[in-house]
Image: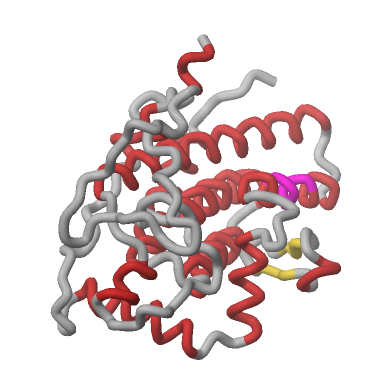
Amino acid sequence: GHEAYINLTSNTYIPPTGPGMWVPTPPGFGKPFHNSWGANRSFLKGIVTKAEALPPPTYSEIPSSEFYKAANHVYQISKKLTRDDSTIAKFWADLPVNYNVPAHAANIVTQLVQLKKLSLPEAAVLYCKHGIAGNESLVVCFSTKYKYIVLRPVTYIRTVLGKPNWNSFIPTPPFPEYSSAHAVVSAAFAVVLEEQFGKKFSFTDHTYKDLYGSRTYNSFEHYAEEAAVSRVYGGIHYTFAATEGLRQGKIVGKEVNRLKFKK
């Protein structure tokens, strides 16, 4: 029934408070979105457990700690963003908003279907697997986000690093930081596409040809890694959230590839 798909955002949800915990972020200081998404029904039984995240680094405000270094890394990157870095951040943030992440990814599939002249049955199965990978990834990721409820870089940089006017280059979404949804979904998509086209397949994404130029990748893993690091360049994720998200997404993709489709 439809009740399986209503776990989006609850107005009654109040996130726990304390050191290192997520709080609403500028500029909108919005309520936490999708706090129940991790409870949505998955296509693959047990996928949340199979792709469970490792715990993030222990929260700390000590300069020698892993957490402080991770936040400072985001801050240092923001001070010297190259033109290519900022293009990557906007390209994968889909700014201005022409697409969202799953739609951009689906557009990549469409380009590949046309490039390789897939038959209708082949294309149908690929779109199906790709869609399942995206759904499972977001269930896995939001389950993780609301398990650990990690604060965003903008909060840490403003308070702990003492930069009260700092803003992320890309607007920070209104939900916890860990792990990175871009990383999880992109890695899962990449593994599904590898199964179809091969690991050493290079391709060009023309989604934003007129806006940012086309971008070429020497593998699907390369595409996933760029999508993941784009969120670090954008100032909204720590590197550890991108790295763990990629690991989770690969697990999701492998599980999707095990599905059998009748020809």
Q: Residue at x 71, y 51 (%)?
A: 99
Q: Residue at x 57, y 44 (%)?
A: 192
Q: Is residue 176 above or below residue 81?
A: above
Q: Nearer the viewer, residue 71 or 190?
A: 71
Residue 236: x and y, percent?
45, 66
Residue 174: x and y, percent?
44, 52
Residue 127: x and y, percent?
69, 35
Left or right of 208 on screen, residue 16: left
Q: Is residue 216 above or below residue 173?
A: below
Residue 209, quarter of the rendered image: bottom right
Left or right of 30 on screen, residue 110: right
Tell me if residue 250 can be seen.
no
Q: Residue at x 21, y 61 (%)?
A: 20
- Chief secondary structure of the magenta portion: helix
Q: Is residue 112 above or below residue 205?
A: above
Q: Residue at x 78, y 63 (%)?
A: 208
Q: Is residue 165 magenta?
A: no
Q: What span is in magenta? A: 106-110
Residue 37: x and y, percent?
42, 34
Question: How has the structure been colored for display?
Answer: secondary structure
Q: Is residue 123 above or below residue 97?
A: above
Tell me if residue 74 can be seen.
yes
The residue lying furthest to the top in this view is: 1
The residue lying furthest to the bottom in this view is: 80
Tally the numbered discs.
Answer: 0
Q: Quadrant of the C terminus?
A: top right
